[in-house]
């Protein structure tokens, strides 16, 4: 049986997404091998903690490369669904807020940067520009992949039933998340960080509304809102917890923990309502 031909547009999206990972991977490769690319102070990456963090974040971009290929080539449709859905869900949660916050990030980067920072100014533009690029193109590749593999999500009907205890707890957690991040947005921190807090708070609220009204028709737009908002809660919350525990700052831990658990609960609740094939 002949392998279906891959459209040129999907190939362009795939390899453009991969191209967006290369600057970040180049930086990480330099830092974990003792290089000083983009560093004003090479000692910034000398600790075991920074080595682990750079390997972890570099590995996440390697996963993005694999996902881009899986979303494009036929072998990707044979991968068990959880092995595809979980990493792209977390990826959506990490990348979508950056894409939505990009105007604020750009405005922040145009300001005069502090020369005491351990990284060169251009590194911030490369990193956040690459993340935004990946966010748009990797998620586009996923949408095209999901349209082929799970077409019934768009054309099917919502399963009957309520959102259950998991959904209710997830909605409550989303509101806690929104309150926490809104409070942090009016505190200290740079413009980009505060903008990120506002975006995460808004995505959490939109996800809660979408989940609460999931039985009222138009299932797939609500699924997109829950997918993105719950992913932002889980992804950014988990990353925030990593930072809190490694940097010894426990002030935000309770809200971040609720945020991660709530994101998982919301996603679980909406997946149970996935429509049958028409």
Image (cartoon, rainbow, N blue to C red):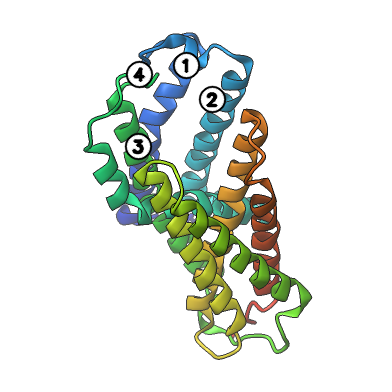
x and y percentages locating residue 44 in the rendered image? 48, 15
Q: Residue tagged by mark 4?
A: 116
Mark 2 or 4, closer to the camera: 4
Which label belongs to residue 19?
3
Mark 1 or 4, closer to the camera: 4
Q: Element under label 4?
A: loop
Dot 3 and dot 4 residues touching (CB under 8 Å)? no
x and y percentages locating residue 56 in the rendered image? 59, 30
* Quarter of the image that includes the C terminus: bottom right
- Counting residues from the start of the chain, the first of labels 2 and 4 encountered is 2
Q: Residue tagged by mark 1?
A: 31
Which label belongs to residue 119?
none
Q: CA distance from mark 1 to mark 4?
A: 19 Å
Viewer-proximal residue, 264 or 79? 264
x and y percentages locating residue 17 in the rendered image? 38, 44
- Counting residues from the start of the chain, the first of labels 1 and 4 encountered is 1
Mark 1 or 3, closer to the camera: 1
> Is 92 drawn above or below residue 60 in the view shown?
below
Q: CA distance from mark 3 to mark 2?
A: 19 Å
Q: Residue tagged by mark 2?
A: 54
Which residue corresponds to the image point at 28% horizontal and 42% vertical from the top-left? 108
Mark 3 or 4, closer to the camera: 4
Dot 2 and dot 1 residues touching (CB under 8 Å)? yes
Mark 3 or 2, closer to the camera: 2
């Amino acid at each position: 049986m002949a392998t279906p031909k891959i459209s040129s547009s999907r190939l362009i999206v795939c390899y453009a997404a991969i191209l967006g990972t290369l600057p970040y991977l180049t930086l990480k490769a330099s830092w974990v091998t003792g290089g000083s690319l983009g560093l004003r102070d090479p000692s910034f990456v000398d600790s075991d903690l920074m080595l682990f963090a750079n390997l972890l974040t570099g590995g996440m971009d390697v996963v993005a490369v694999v996902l881009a290929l899986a979303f494009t080539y036929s072998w990707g449709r044979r991968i068990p669904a959880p092995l595809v859905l979980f990493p792209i869900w977390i990826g959506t949660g990490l990348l979508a807020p950056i894409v939505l916050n990009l105007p604020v990030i750009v405005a922040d980067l145009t300001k005069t940067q502090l020369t005491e920072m351990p990284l060169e100014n251009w590194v911030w533009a490369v990193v956040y520009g690459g993340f935004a690029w990946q966010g748009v193109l990797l998620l586009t590749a996923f949408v095209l992949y999901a349209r082929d593999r799970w077409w019934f999500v768009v054309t099917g009907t919502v399963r009957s039933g309520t959102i259950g205890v998991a959904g209710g707890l997830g909605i409550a957690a989303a509101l806690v998340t929104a309150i926490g991040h809104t409070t942090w947005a009016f505190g200290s921190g740079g413009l980009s960080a505060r903008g990120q807090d506002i975006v995460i708070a808004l995505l959490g609220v939109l996800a809660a509304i979408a989940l609460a009204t999931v039985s009222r028709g138009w299932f797939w737009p609500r699924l997109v809102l829950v997918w993105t908002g719950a992913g932002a809660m889980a992804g950014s919350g988990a990353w925030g917890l990593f930072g809190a525990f490694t940097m010894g700052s426990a002030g935000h831990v309770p809200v971040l923990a609720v945020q991660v658990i709530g994101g998982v609960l919301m996603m679980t609740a909406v997946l149970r309502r996935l429509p049958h094939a028409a």
